[in-house]
Each structure stands twice: as structure tokens, then as C-alpha cells.
Image (spheres, rainbow, N blue to C red):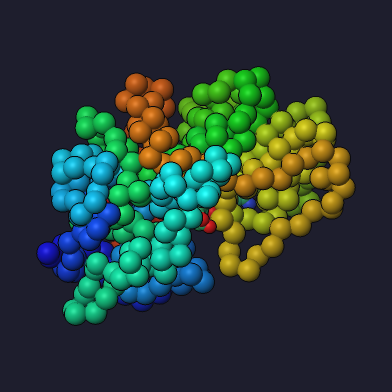
Amino acid sequence: MDVRAAIALEAGKPLVVDTVQLAGPREGEVLVEIMATGLCHTDKYTLSGNDPEGLFPSILGHEGAGIVREVGAGVKHLKPGDHVIPLYTPECRECPSCLSRKTNLCTSIRGTQGKGLMPDGTTRFSYKGKPVHHYMGCSTFANFTVMPEIALAKIRPDAPFDKVCYIGCGVTTGIGAVLFTAKVEAGSTVAVFGLGGIGLNVIQGAKMVGANRIIGIDINPEREAIARKFGMTDFVNPKDLGEKGDLVGHLIEMTGGGADYTFECVGNVGLMRQALESAHRGWGVSCVIGVAGAGQEISTRPFQLVTGRRWIGSAFGGARGRTDVPKIVDWYMEGRINIDDLITHEMKLDDINKGFEMMERGEGIRNVVNY
Ligand code: NAD
Ligand code: DAO
Ligand code: ZN
């Protein structure tokens, strides 16, 4: 079938909005009409050409919501008409990782997904007769996509697509890192480094679990107001500490020894170190969420760990997509979490490059394409 898509033809070039061809779902696969998709910094990173695993041509986008239109042979849990959120971290419930109950990083289709292919090693998209890669197993920058059944979370039908699409990445990543990965307790002191689309969701997760003090750190002073709305109690702009400002020392003093939990939500390896070192001696946990540039490394003095700080990381908030994403949609529909105030711009697919330019300028929190 013909579908409308924003194609990443070449690294560093704008997306091309055009008609591409999509083959139907094969065994275990599902055709989904994408109704809305968020634009995430990871899409921008891949398009820039800096992602060593980026493939071209491809159809980017991994933060979508849509409706099942057709199912392939052997599909057991979905039917046409079901509302779904695509999962770049699938949940097969059968692989050693899923069965371990120790991780959300399902390994069943990891090999092909990383190569931009469906589990049978082929692609469903083509453009001008040539194959086009899938992206993160989702490709939500097309109004129809084909996905494996194990990579779709079935959600309630009354949830608005243009809001809950954000649960497909940013919301779940931020809230999940607090609830599922770090398991922050009520009464904790939490420090959040970077108050963008991820960090603001860490803040609302910390508020949800009853954190006592939530300190936000950002070099953009405009982030203070929205972060306070989401539950931040204290704001620190490292630029206000001066050229040689000691952010770690400042935070340790503010918290009487360090935060119980710190979260790095930028992707800056220097900040990751500061986040670790701002965690409380003896028990502080520092969680890396930000994705650093290719080849970068983190470092600290090992004594930081010997003296009881723990350095951990979180992918997709530690969420098991098919199990946890429908619950997070329920939390939104019950008014327990706020997504509306984080969706700062909506646009049509034809304007998607304007959304990328806004991300580049750091404007707004989340842009959504409403098909
Ligand atoms: P964003 O650009 O919306 O937010 C980043 C924020 O960090 C901005 O407010 C910016 O002003 C601030 N910032 C930049 N440099 C800073 C510094 N030195 N000190 C303090 N603040 C600083 O980005 P986002 O969408 O929130 O994504 C954040 C990171 O999370 C990215 O690296 C992204 O790739 C990553 N991410 C990880 C996962 C995961 O599963 N682990 C999922 C999605 C995104
Ligand atoms: O199982 O090794 C694996 C792949 C895990 C993918 C998780 C990616 C999380 C971070 C990427 C940012 C997402 C937008
Ligand atoms: Zn699995």
C-alpha cells in the first residue's frame, strides 16, 4: 500500500515527506495506522549522522500511538480496531531476559531491530523501488507501519493519541526510571540534572512516589517555571554558580550530605559524574538516563563507589512495555500524571522539519505530529 512518510534519506539533511510503499504484515506482525507521534531528541541524533548505528534511508520515529488495521498469521493478542502504542523495547515474555524478571531489555528481536529490519530479516518499507530501513522497530514517522505483535502495547480506546503517544518514550522513560529502576521511596531527596522532556517526567515520577525534596538543575532558566509546576521544590542553574562554580559542593551543602537519588537526563558525561558525586555518601543512587555521544566514556574516583554510592542506568524507564505502558495510560486518563502541559507544539507531517528545527533551538518540551 501507499503511505505518507517523512523519510531520512541522508544523514544531516532534512526529512523528505513523500509517498512510500509498505508491504502487509507477515506472520506475527501487525499493520498499525499511526495517529500521532512525538519527536524525540534520539530521532534528531540519528538524523544528524552522529549515531554510529544510524541507517539510511530509514523512516525514523519511535514515540507513537495508533490503531491496529490488519494482523498477520499467528497473531494472538491483537485484532483490528485495537488501540496500541509501539514499543522500541518489546516484551516477548519468552526470552531469557523477559523470563529473568531482572530486566525490561527483551532480547527476542534485538538483532534484526538494530539492523533496521523486521524479525525475518527483511524490510516492509520501500521508496522508488529500493528498500527503506525501519527505525528502533517502530518507524512512527509514517501514517502506517508494520510491527511485531510483541512490540505493541494494547491501550484503552478512549485515550487521546496526540497525548499518549508521548508514553511511547519520554513519559515512560522518566517516570519509569523513578518507579521501576531506582524505586525511589517516599520522603527521599531527589536531584534531577536536565529539565527537558525526560527530566520533567522524572520530576513528576518523584512527586508521585512522595519524594520530599526535588531539586532540578538546568542551564536554561526558562525551565524553572514548568519544573516547579511538575513538583520541583528547588532550582539550581549551574551558570549562577560562576565560572569555577562547584555544583557538587553546592548540592551536597543544600542537601546536608547529598541526594538520596540523582538522575542524569542530558547525555553529558561530565554531568553524569557530577550527578554520581552529588549522591549521598553511603547510600546515594545515581541513575544515568541521558544517552551520551558515540565513543564517550564516564569516569569518577573509585572511592566514590567504595564509599557507598551506586551508579545505575535505565532504558525505557525499566518498563516492560506490554505490561506497564497500558497502566501508565490509565494513570494519565485518571489525572494522576500530566502530559498535556509537556506537549508544547502540535503539527502536521508536512511540517515535521520545523519540529526538528525547534528541537535544535531547544524550544518547547515536546512536539507532536498529529496525522
Ligand atoms: P532535552 O533536550 O529536552 O532536555 C535536556 C535538558 O538538559 C535541557 O533543558 C537543557 O537545557 C539541559 N541541559 C543541557 N546541558 C546541561 C548541563 N550541562 N547542565 C544542566 N542542564 C543541561 O532532552 P530530553 O528529550 O529530555 O532527553 C534527555 C536525554 O535522555 C537525551 O540524551 C536522550 O537521548 C535521552 N533519552 C534516554 C532514554 C533512555 O531510555 N535511557 C530515552 C529517551 C531519551
Ligand atoms: O537491548 O541492548 C538492547 C537495546 C536496548 C535499547 C534501549 C534504548 C534506550 C535508550 C535509547 C534512547 C531511546 C529513545
Ligand atoms: Zn523477551
The x and y percentages for residue 297 are: 69, 62
Q: Is residue 365 above or below residue 17?
A: above
- Residue 216, by quadrant, is top right
Q: Is residue 235 visible?
A: no
The x and y percentages for residue 231 are: 53, 26
Asked whether 272 or 115 is in front, the reply is 115
Q: Is residue 296 left or right of residue 66?
A: right
The x and y percentages for residue 301 are: 84, 53
- Residue 260, by quadrant, is top right
Q: Is residue 210 left or right of residue 118?
A: right
User: Which residue is depicted at the point 53% across and 49% down?
Assistant: 97
User: Which residue is depicted at the point 48% across and 40% down?
Assistant: 319
Q: Quadrant of the N terminus?
A: bottom left
Furthest residue in direction left, as rendered? 1
User: Which residue is depicted at the point 38% across and 40% down?
Assistant: 322
Furthest residue in direction bottom, as rendered? 129
Asked whether 58 or 190 is in front, the reply is 58
